[in-house]
Amino acid sequence: MDIKLDRQYLKGYIKESDYTKLLPKIKKAHEDLEGRKGKGAEFTGWLDLPRQTKDSFLDELVKLGQEVRGHSDCLLSIGIGGSYIGIRATLEFLVAEQKLPVYYAGHNLSSGYLYHLLKTLEHKQVTVVVISKSGTTTEPALAFRIVKEFMQKKYSAQELKKRIICITDAKKGALRNIVNREGYRSYVISDDVGGRFSVLTPAGLVSLAIAGVDIKALMDGAREAQIACAKMDLKKNVAYQYAGARFLLYKQNKTIEVLSTFYQRFAFVQEWWKQLCGESEGKDGKGIFPASLGFTTDLHSMGQLIQEGKRNIFETFLLAEQADQKVLIPHDAENLDNFNCVAGQDLDYVNKQAHKATAKAHYDGGVPNMTISVPRFDAYSLGQLYYFFEKAIAIKGYLLGVNPFDQPGVEAYKTNMFKLLGRK
Ligand code: PA5
């Protein structure tokens, strides 16, 4: 696997012998997960998903993408949480591959946002993909109700069968009922994959294929990671190394993990990771608080707190070995800014030195840190990264003793809101 984990700045916090002592627990977590006998085992369908996904199904989605791009100027993807973030994370990471503009709805309840979005779409040829595993989530359900009315004014009932695609449960939920009634095209998210683990199911793949992403390369990357991350060998399995490090740091009261990047393209991967960690670990009074920062911008704001604030933080940097573009720094005869020292260098060289400087400074300031790197901004690398994180966070959940695959806590606000709305 191409993903690398640099642990040099964990020195003094985690010794090799700590890993050795942790090994039996990691082995147990590994056996429980791979043997489908741990907590929440009924939601471990994502484990074997890359290998199980048939190429013929990916071909079908690629064809669907070609068809939609033939009749639409844009895609409106409706969904929230796991039915939203993974799509956006993938498209922002692979921005150069995107062939069709994608808009999002159903991830908030802001009337201003939806009003302006529908104005933007007024004169465009639109295809809508609505994604809700449960088929009952408030935000996408209301967005779809409003968007459906907008689409019905724009297109005939026949045309809508082409332009509305629903991704939901095979049998149950309001969205499935709408599909049955209206005859919209639909794809299924299987029962054994939870929302935050669903980016490589139709929940993510349909919108991504329509946007023009190389979903086959994405899946191939995940397939490679599936093989690499299935080995119970701590020396080779970087997902288990990362899970172990997070657990050992948490035990030292490092209860906040900041996922920092020096590349804007990771911004929504960070958001995806936050959902994955937050919902998987944050229960039973336990869990690392997952935060994210974008450097070097945030070094000029939050950098102060990381360097000198309360020492309950550890940091994980997210890097790409190869930058997306080359931008050479010119020589300046007058050298008034005194930066001829980097003249002729690619700007990414300076970015990489900023990472090295930051990792050392934060370590010296009492923030243990690691660096995860992918080779480049392509679909294959991202597929690997998704699977790597999913496996690491699942193992970490088992180390912590929680069920990493449920999210009972998210119901509390819904119950209150439904009471306020008078919804039965
Ligand atoms: O991880 C989860 O399961 C949740 O965050 C869901 O993804 C989110 O609530 C959206 O749910 P649904 O796809 O059922 O509308």
Image: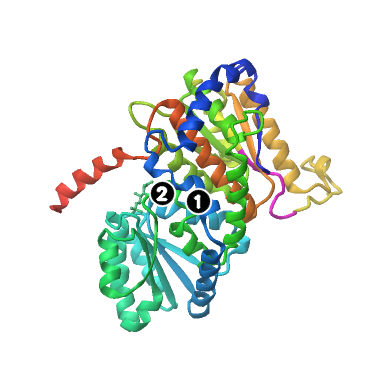
| Mark seen at residue 103 | none
- Residue 291 visible in this rendered orientation of the protein: no
Tell me, yes or no, whether the highlighted magenta stretch contains residue 325.
Answer: yes
Q: Earlier in the sequence, mark 1 or mark 2?
A: 1
The crowding category of the residue bearing disc 1, from other C-alpha atoms within 10 Å (few below 14, some 14 to 19, many at least 20), is: some
Secondary structure category for the residue under label 2: loop
- The residue beneath circle 1 is 49
- The residue beneath circle 2 is 193
Residue at 72% x, 46% y is 348
The image quadrant that residue 297 belongs to is top right
Point out the stretch of residues depicted in magenta: 318-326
User: x and y percent of residue 312 in the render?
Assistant: 48, 22
Q: Main secondary structure of the magenta part?
A: loop
Mark 1 vs mark 2, CA separation in Å:
9 Å
Residue at 48% x, 80% y is 71
Q: Is residue 185 left or right of residue 324?
A: left
The crowding category of the residue bearing disc 2, from other C-alpha atoms within 10 Å (few below 14, some 14 to 19, many at least 20), is: many
